[in-house]
Amino acid sequence: MKYQPAPSVAHVVLKTEMEAYESMRPKLESMYANEWAVVRGSELIGVYPEFSDAAREARKRFGRGPYLIRQVAPTNWQDHIKRHWQSHADS
């Protein structure tokens, strides 16, 4: 039997938010790379240019939570670097 650690409290509490973010990830990556997404339940609350903006809005609307704030980052960083490099090379 393989040992598997228990999930963290955050993972259990934010399971719905994390699953929702993963389902939205492809669209978010194509539209909001490097910005900050706020997810509550299965709903995207908003996308913000800075973490502080996302945190301020989440706190204002939902207090201490739960909610997920995650930077929209590519799943494959090598593809991201290649696209970034290519966009600068084309300029």
Image: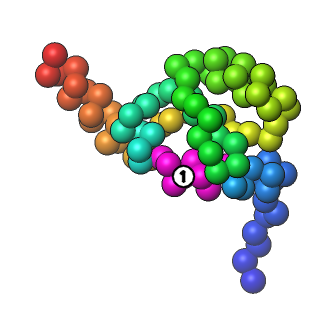
Q: Image point 64% across, 40% down: which residue?
A: 39
Q: How many marks?
A: 1
The quarter in which the N terminus is drawn is bottom right
- Secondary element under disc 1, as helix, strand or loop, is helix
Where is residue 27? Give x, y as percent: 41, 44
Where is residue 66? Give x, y as percent: 80, 41
Q: Image point 27% across, 34% down: which residue?
A: 83
- Look at the image and give the residue range highlighted in magenta: 17-25
Identify the main secondary structure in magenta: helix
In which quarter of the view is residue 67 placed? top right
Asked if 19 appears above or below 64 in the picture, the reply is below
Quick check: 77 left or right of 24? Answer: left
Where is residue 80? Give x, y as percent: 35, 37
Where is residue 65? Give x, y as percent: 82, 37
Asked if 26 appears above or below 73 in the picture, the reply is below
- Which of 44/52 is in front? 44
The quarter in which the C terminus is drawn is top left
Quick check: 20 left or right of 72? Answer: right
In which quarter of the view is residue 7 placed? bottom right
Q: Image point 76% across, 72% down: which residue?
A: 3
Can residue 33 be seen at all in this image of the molecule? yes
- Which of 52/6 is in front? 52
Quick check: 17 left or right of 86? Answer: right
Q: Residues within 10 Å of mark 1 (few under 14, many from 20)?
A: few
Query: In the image as oriented, which residue stretches furthest toward the left?
Result: 90
Q: Image point 52% across, 19% down: which residue?
A: 49
Can residue 18 be seen at all in this image of the molecule? no
Disc 1 designates what residue?
22
